[in-house]
């Protein structure tokens, strides 16, 4: 038969149980006996937190990291020529071709043939435009009248501005003049012309030439003869 505890022993056991229960309660309140689910939930909450505007992760206090400022350039130091598809020397070479074409257009020796007149411009033109010029070289009644007078007209031209440019072409506005020598010599201001020059194998050639108010915005499609050596 089991022996019953005395009253003093019972009080001692009861006190020990109270101490154990109090200690266990304190342990739980401090986060003990965790299976990691609490940490996972915290981690999950942090991962699902949406980023702040601009892609920066918002902190617990709601602060957003400041953006990194981009570098800026002072007006006097801006590399303007680097923004164009051509160097300054290439622009000058293109303008010289446009200007020479305008001069050739205004230079006419009526003692020669219309074919000779257009041949000077054909040398400065692309293959396609040279063909167009060849088809325009028919003689006219005016040509015969000027030939009877042995008239010679000297052309002058000057580039006024750049109208537009592309990756391999530039359109200039060129003022053209024709001065006729002789007893009845006259000076004709032929007007402004839009002259489009295209880079063909490292050489500038005239692709189009027409009065500046007629259009000519410099659209130069790719052509089979554009590569070097063609």
Image (cartoon, grey):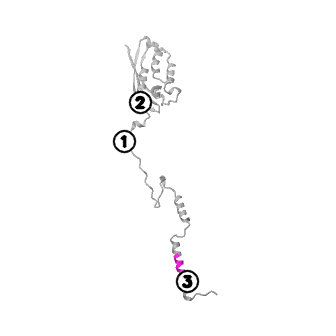
Distance from disc 3 to disc 1, alpha carbons, whole Å, reads 90 Å
Callout 3: SS: helix
Task: Give x and y (percent) for residue 2.
Answer: 62, 86
Task: Give x and y (percent) for residue 139.
Answer: 49, 15
Q: Is residue 34 above or below residue 135?
A: below
Question: Residue at (55%, 62%) from the top-left corner?
Answer: 40
Q: Which residues are magenta?
A: 17-23
Taking depth in this image into account, of 173 and 227 the one nearest to the observer is 227
Q: Is residue 22 above or below residue 220?
A: below
Give neighbour class at mark 3: few <14, some 14-19, many 20+ (Cα, 10 Å): few
Distance from disc 2 to disc 1, alpha carbons, whole Å, reads 24 Å
Decide which of tag 3 and tag 2 comes sooner along the chain.
3
Residue labelled with disc 2: 90
Q: Quadrant of residue 104?
A: top left
Residue labelled with disc 1: 75
Residue labelled with disc 3: 13
Residue 93 visible at all:
yes
**Quadrant where the N terminus lies?**
bottom right
Question: Residue at (48%, 14%) from the top-left corner?
Answer: 141
- Predominant SS of the magenta segment: helix
Farthest residue in the left direction? 76
Give neighbour class at mark 1: few <14, some 14-19, many 20+ (Cα, 10 Å): few
Q: Is residue 196 above or below residue 82?
A: above
Residue 19 in magenta? yes
Callout 1: SS: helix
Residue 188 visible at all:
no
Distance from disc 3 to disc 2, alpha carbons, whole Å, reads 104 Å
């Amino acid at each position: 038969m089991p022996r019953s505890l005395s009253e003093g022993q019972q009080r001692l056991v009861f006190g020990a149980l109270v101490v154990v229960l109090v200690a266990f309660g304190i342990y739980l309140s401090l986060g003990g006996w965790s299976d990691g689910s609490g940490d996972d939930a915290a981690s999950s909450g942090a991962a699902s937190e949406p980023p702040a505007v601009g892609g920066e992760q918002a902190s617990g206090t709601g602060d957003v990291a400041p953006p990194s400022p981009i570098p800026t350039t002072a007006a006097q130091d801006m590399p303007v020529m680097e923004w164009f598809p051509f160097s300054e020397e290439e622009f000058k070479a293109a303008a010289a071709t446009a200007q020479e074409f305008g001069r050739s257009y205004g230079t006419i020796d009526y003692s020669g043939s219309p074919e000779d007149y257009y041949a000077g411009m054909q040398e400065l033109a692309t293959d396609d435009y040279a063909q167009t010029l060849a088809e325009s070289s028919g003689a006219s009644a005016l040509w015969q009248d000027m030939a009877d007078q042995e008239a010679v007209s000297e052309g002058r031209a000057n580039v006024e501005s750049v109208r537009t440019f592309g990756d391999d072409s530039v359109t200039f506005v060129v003022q053209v003049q024709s001065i006729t020598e002789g007893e009845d010599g006259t000076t004709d201001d032929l007007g402004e012309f839009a002259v489009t020059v295209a880079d063909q194998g490292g050489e500038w050639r005239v692709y189009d030439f027409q009065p500046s108010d007629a259009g000519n915005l410099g659209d130069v499609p790719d052509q089979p003869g554009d590569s070097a050596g063609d």
